[in-house]
Image (spheres, rainbow, N blue to C red):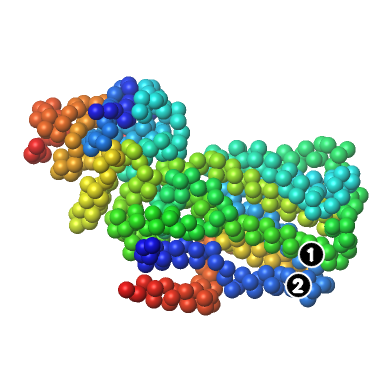
């Protein structure tokens, strides 16, 4: 298998705390990779480093073997590293249609088009609508994002990322805070992600993790603690002790 | 060919509806142009309204659309004004329209260079930085009095006739026709721009820079671009003032001018292009009326308006225009017809 995204001795220090401690992680092409760990373990920080939102204190990040440590966020998106946010980061005043349309037009490099009216490219509109249909957002496409139900906003988070056509998709707790009866919609959207997209999923719900992942990395106190297949991780006594605690896990 | 699905039709319709002309917009511009013939005795104040409207439109582009607040927008206004006045005074460029364009390009260059100062930081830092830039320019213009006329202003410029034909008269007849035409053309360009994917990306950058960069937008580059364009607009507004009065002064860079501009935009409401123009009308008419009534108390009234705005709150101010806009939407008979058409379309088998 080829490695798409790799970190070498990646580190991030905040004042008084090491949020990412010497992490060397390899994510294989097409993988369904889960990243788990207790609250404050440094999972989100790792995503911030991978996407360039934060500058690492040390170490390197490679995409297809090329060092991208100094590439700014928006260029990494162009290279195919796309994320979602644990806490919604959407455009409250725009509608889902505008949001997705924007992402699609930026991906196509048409974002600087200033003489063309929004909506005047039929193929762009139909692609955007297609994405909104896939995520069951068609009934709210003309509504301001800020007033959408929380579950719809979570779906939009993923839909925007998909509109960027990721090669590597980093999902930061996509179902966080979604009421039980709406979770399945998010989870099936995650499960239906195209096979050629490599996915790194952060999730606390072990049922989701074990049904989704073919590889699991456990992060504790900023450092990689254990890594392996779901079976290996489930069997690992240290993981049970440190992280999973009393939670029953069926492999 | 597969016919497009109803959702796509509706989506296309909805997206392009934003950019469609509202009947009230036609009314607005017909009135503005009709004033050339119908209100000749008011051309002087109308000219002032026109360049102020353009100046406010410029601020709206950065504040209403990109979220960059500025207390030093007069920097570009004054810079453009001095360029136009100098070009005329030293007879470097005699055609006013050409001089106007050069003033705009000059102000854009200044906007580009200083845009890097407003990329980072909070609203407060931006206020201070923009204020500083304007003060600096004012000081430079003061220092180099041999060129700019210093505190006396740049006098003795003679503005040649427009296209070699239309003389600038003391009643402002030519001045108003000229200013309102320039305003209209630049408004059309701005209108196009804010309804484009580029304009949409500005709103996204304003709304959430973090997410914007997460969908591949270079936030900095967009801000630099719109700041540069807006600076050009402000420069042209200043050049209009300089050309229609054949005068440029240090006051063009003043803090008062930047602050008044902010007030104008707040009065009219930011983020829909007409706010600056409506604000300019209200502001100038109020100034004209109140300063005739109580000359010494004019600043007091402006101060009062500011206090009220602060008390009522910024959010509510920006939304006070919503009822009018809703009313305007109801007045738009074509929108209703289109909505009906679209729903028929959707029901077809
Ligand atoms: N910008 C920051 N400045 C200072 N400390 C930070 C910053 N961001 C995160 N941290 C700290 O780094 C540690 C890791 O935080 P992070 O958000 O990465 O954890 P997480 O694994 O995503 O947790 P959760 O499961 O709660 O989302 C925490 O102790 C947090 O307080
Ligand atoms: Mg987190």
Q: Residues within 10 Å of mark 1 (few under 14, many from 20)?
A: many
Residue B52 circle label: none
Q: Residue at image x 49%, y 74%?
A: B335
Tell me which chain the residue with mark 1 is part of. B
Q: How many marks?
A: 2
Identify the mark nearer the N-term, 2 or 1. Answer: 2
Between residues B321 and B196, which one lies in front from this camera angle?
Answer: B196
Residue B246 appears at what percent x and percent y?
Answer: 86, 54
Residue B176 circle label: 1
Residue B35 circle label: 2
Residue A75 appears at what percent x and percent y?
Answer: 45, 36
Left or right relative to B218: residue B173: right
Residue B125 appears at what percent x and percent y?
Answer: 57, 41
Left or right relative to B1: residue A119: right
Q: Residue at image x 69%, y 41%?
A: B109
Q: Can the viewer see residue A120?
A: yes
> Relative to B24, is B112 above or below?
above
Q: Residues within 10 Å of mark 2 (few under 14, many from 20)?
A: some
Tell me the CA gap for discs 2 and 1: 9 Å
For mark 2, give the secondary structure: helix
Between residues B46 and B139, which one lies in front from this camera angle?
Answer: B46
Q: Can the viewer see residue B311?
A: no
Q: Is mark 1 within 8 Å of ligand 1?
A: no
Residue B61 appears at what percent x and percent y?
Answer: 60, 53
Between residues B16 and A200, which one lies in front from this camera angle?
Answer: B16
Left or right relative to B196: residue A213: left
Q: Quadrant of the C terminus of chain A?
A: top left
For mark 1, give the secondary structure: helix
* Image-quadrant location for residue B10: bottom left
């Amino acid at each position: 298998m080829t490695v798409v995204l790799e970190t070498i001795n990646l580190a991030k220090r905040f004042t008084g705390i090491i949020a990412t401690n010497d992490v060397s992680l390899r994510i294989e092409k097409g993988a369904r990779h889960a990243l788990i760990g207790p609250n404050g373990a440094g999972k989100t920080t790792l995503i911030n480093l991978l996407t360039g939102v934060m500058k690492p204190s040390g170490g390197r990040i490679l995409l297809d073997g090329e060092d991208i440590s100094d590439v700014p966020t928006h260029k990494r998106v162009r290279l195919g590293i796309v994320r979602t946010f644990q806490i919604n980061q959407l455009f409250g005043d725009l509608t889902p249609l505008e949001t997705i349309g924007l992402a699609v037009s930026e991906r196509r490099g048409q974002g600087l088009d200033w003489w063309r009216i929004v909506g005047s490219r039929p193929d762009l509109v139909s692609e955007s609508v297609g994405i909104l249909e896939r995520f069951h957002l068609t009934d709210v496409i003309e509504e301001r994002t800020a007033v959408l139900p929380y579950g719809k906003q979570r779906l939009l988070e993923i839909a925007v990322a998909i509109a960027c056509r990721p090669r590597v998709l980093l999902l930061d707790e996509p179902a966080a805070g979604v009421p039980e009866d709406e979770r399945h919609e998010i989870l099936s959207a995650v499960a239906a992600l195209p096979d050629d997209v490599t996915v790194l999923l952060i999730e606390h719900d072990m049922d989701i993790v074990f049904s989704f992942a073919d590889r699991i990395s456990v992060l504790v106190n900023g450092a990689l603690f254990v890594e392996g297949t779901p079976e290996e991780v489930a069997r690992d006594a240290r993981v049970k002790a440190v992280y999973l605690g009393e939670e029953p896990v069926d492999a | 060919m597969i016919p497009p699905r109803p959702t796509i039709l509706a989506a296309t319709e909805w997206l392009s509806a934003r950019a469609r002309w509202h009947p009230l917009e036609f009314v607005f511009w017909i009135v503005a142009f009709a004033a050339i013939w119908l209100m000749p005795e008011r051309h002087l104040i109308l000219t002032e309204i026109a360049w102020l409207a353009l100046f406010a439109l410029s601020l709206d582009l950065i504040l209403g659309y990109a979220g960059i607040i500025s207390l030093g927008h007069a920097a570009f206004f004054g810079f453009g004004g001095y360029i136009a006045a100098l070009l005329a005074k030293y007879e470097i460029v005699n055609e006013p329209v050409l001089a106007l364009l050069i003033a705009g390009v000059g102000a854009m260059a200044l906007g580009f260079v200083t845009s890097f100062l407003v990329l980072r930081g909070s609203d407060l830092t931006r206020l201070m930085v923009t204020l500083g830039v304007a003060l600096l320019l004012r000081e430079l213009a003061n220092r180099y009095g041999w060129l700019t006329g210093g505190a006396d202003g740049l006098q003795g410029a003679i503005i040649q006739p427009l296209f070699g034909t239309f003389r600038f008269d003391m009643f402002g007849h030519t001045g108003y026709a000229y200013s309102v035409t320039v305003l209209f053309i630049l408004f059309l360009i701005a209108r196009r721009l804010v309804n484009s994917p580029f304009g949409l990306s500005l709103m996204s950058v304003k709304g959430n820079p973090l997410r914007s960069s997460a969908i591949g937008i270079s936030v900095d580059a967009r801000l630099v671009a719109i700041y540069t364009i807006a600076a050009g607009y402000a420069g042209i507004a200043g050049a209009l003032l300089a050309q229609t009065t054949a005068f440029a002064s240090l006051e063009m860079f003043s803090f008062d001018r930047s602050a008044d501009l902010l007030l104008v935009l707040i009065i009219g409401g930011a983020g829909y292009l007409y706010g600056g123009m409506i604000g300019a009308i209200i502001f100038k008419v109020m100034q004209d009326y109140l300063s005739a009534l109580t000359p010494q108390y004019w600043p007091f009234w402006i101060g009062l308006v500011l206090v009220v705005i602060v008390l009522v709150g910024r959010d509510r101010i920006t939304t006070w225009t919503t009822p009018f806009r809703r009313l305007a939407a109801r007045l738009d008979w074509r929108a209703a017809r289109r909505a009906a058409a679209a729903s028929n379309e959707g029901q077809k088998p």
